[in-house]
Amino acid sequence: MTAPWSYVETQAIYQQEWLGFEDAPQTFSASVQLPLVALNMSLGAQLTQDNIGPLQQTSISLMYAYQLRLSYHDRLAIGIVANASQFGFDGSNLSAFDVDDVALVGGANKESQINFGLGVYYTSVNTEEMDEAHFFAGLSVMQALPGELIFESVTALANLKRNLHAFGQVGYRFAQDNGFLQTSAQVLYAAPNLTHFQLDVQYEMFDTFWGGLSMDSAFRAGLQLGYIIANIGDGTVRIGSMVSYNLNSRGTEQGMSVQALVGYRYEL
């Protein structure tokens, strides 16, 4: 899914989970995607920082995809991502019922790991036809090299093992004269036995706005809205936000989650 169309895109996203929960997860990411249409290739890069209580992760990812033209319209992209991450852990910031918990031992620690992922992505239109109705489907795996993550001052009992993650998606985009309606279903799997499903519907009016709704298997509902500012240089600025809320009893404990996005797209 790295730069599947004929435009360059830069994007920054900030996400704050569970506003009613102390030390709730925070994520920041910045990315760029560059299509090399004449070579049937695309490149991408992403910087991500996660803060989850005493654990911090900073990652740099580089993506490459090659597009096989199955016919004039149909494409199958094969991609790979290389990822370098630094993990920080500060057990002194933890609160626990068991004061002898091994995770409480020591102060700040840092460890680094390298990993990679693979994926395939099919679309029933070519690079220049994103405005046309089409079917799409993809499958990918991340952290393809599962491994242990043990900080020096913490024993193996506090192993934050990195497990394989898989992601699948299938959907259809219905074309309209001035925009499109897109529906999709996603499944996320984390080894050894965690599975998560999500349904999405999104409408976008070209160069004007977009909006969408989502519902997942944890009964979390999401609403997204975005505004598109056209004719900025050679492209468009996209500014959006998303809020989600757990509809079961956990919602009152966690509170709302919010996300903000700003991006820039321009055709090559």
Image: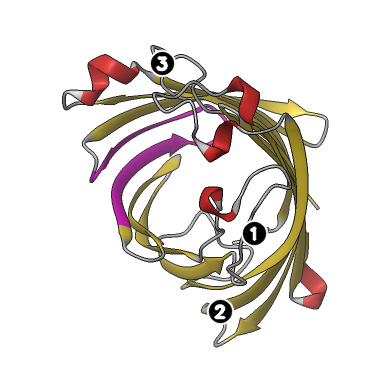
Q: Which residues are magenta?
A: 195-217
Looking at the rendered structure, the secondary structure element under dot 2 is: strand
Residue 24 drawn above or below residue 77:
above
User: Rounded to the nearest whole Å, what is the CA distance between mark 1 and mark 3?
Assistant: 39 Å
* Picture residue at 45% right of the left edge, 39% below the top: 178
- Please state which of the two labelled residues, at mark 3 or mark 2, is closer to the viewer: 3
Q: Classify 10 Å Cα crowding around label 1: few (below 14), some (14-19), many (20 and above).
A: many
Q: Position of residue 238 (x, y in %)?
A: 62, 29
* Horizontal and vertical percent position of residue 222: 33, 30
**To which residue does mark 3 refer?**
21
**Which mark's residue is nearer the viewer, 2 or 1?**
2
Q: Amino acid at mark 1?
A: Trp
The image quarter in which residue 162 lies: bottom right
- Per the rendering, the mark at residue 51 is none
Residue at position x 56%, y 62% in the image: 129
Q: Identify residue for label 1.
A: 5
